[in-house]
Image (cartoon, grey):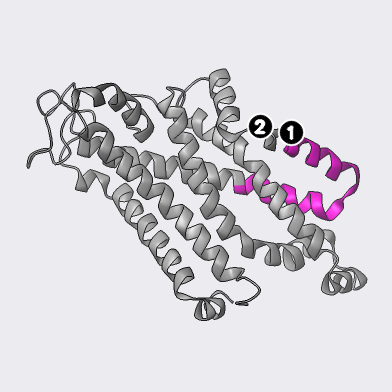
Amino acid sequence: MFLQKYRKAGFKQKFMFWLGLTLVLSIGVFSIFAPFITPYSPREIVGGSQNPPSLKHPMGTTKLGYDVFSKTIYGSRMAFTAGIIASVLALTFGLPLGLVSGYTGGFLDRLMVMLMDALYSFPGLLLAIIITATIGPGVFNAALAVFVVFTPQYFRVVRNHTLSIKQETFVEASRALGASTLLILIRDIFLNVVQSIPVIFSSNAASAILVLAGLSFLGLGITPPTPSLGYELSAAQRYLDNGIWWRALFPGIFMVMIISGFSFLGEGLNEILNPPADQG
């Protein structure tokens, strides 16, 4: 189905899809091969204080003499990995909850909708700040906070799709033939709902990574000695007035690449799978 819709898509949709996929795969390669790409450990003092970019340190050094290139690559790896893990966890919980809630209805549906709407009503970063301020900073706690923030989004999308699909004739036919609720959920509803998941996942992964960076920027997410783009940007801002531009520029570029990659990929997938009426 995807290949059929891809062939019918216009240049803009294909360009966004491939641009996003290229950026995401590039960061993924950097993340996987970080130990082989970086010349130094991100926790190793290897140069002078605040040295500008040079052949030895292509992105300069920090005040304590750490290599900015190594910290940026490892920070990208952490942002990419933690964002994906948090998004997968949110999907793992949000998808089945949305399926069950939308299909069963009744009191359980109303209760779950109330709970998810209460979480969804909070701004994502604010809710994540509240959670991490309560349980403390750290990689696991930051990922847990992002997981809680984005689970309601998967729940709402999946539930709405389920409410629509369960009224279809083929679902009614399965019920009439005596199919179990579990079989109907998996065979008839899940297989139709899951087609929209890649779009949601790509878009939410970008938001999840942005929230993680925001938490680290505020000192509530991933903290030293673990490399983090958010923390690097926070530490770099105090030196901008002194002309130390490289500490903020390169981590900022990688952060933009990661978020833009997932955003373009999600938008491209959405326009390919759900083309406007005048194109479909």
Secondary structure under the numbered disc 1 in the rendered image: helix
Q: Which residues are magenta?
A: 91-118
Residue at x-position 52% and y-position 60%: 267
Q: Is residue 101 magenta?
A: yes
- Which amino acid type is shown beneath numbered disc 2? Phe
**Which quadrant holds residue 22?**
bottom left
**Disc 2 marks which residue?**
122
Quick one: quadrant of the N terminus?
Answer: bottom right
Give the total number of marks visible in the rendering.
2
Please say if 168 is above or below 221. below
- Which amino acid type is shown beneath numbered disc 1? Ala
The mark found on residue 50 in the picture is none
**Image coordinates for residue 204, horizontal then vertical, percent:** 55, 48
**Disc 1 marks which residue?**
118
Residue at x-position 41% and y-position 59%: 20
**Image coordinates for residue 260, horizontal then vertical, percent:** 42, 51
Magenta: main secondary structure: helix
Secondary structure under the numbered disc 2 in the rendered image: loop
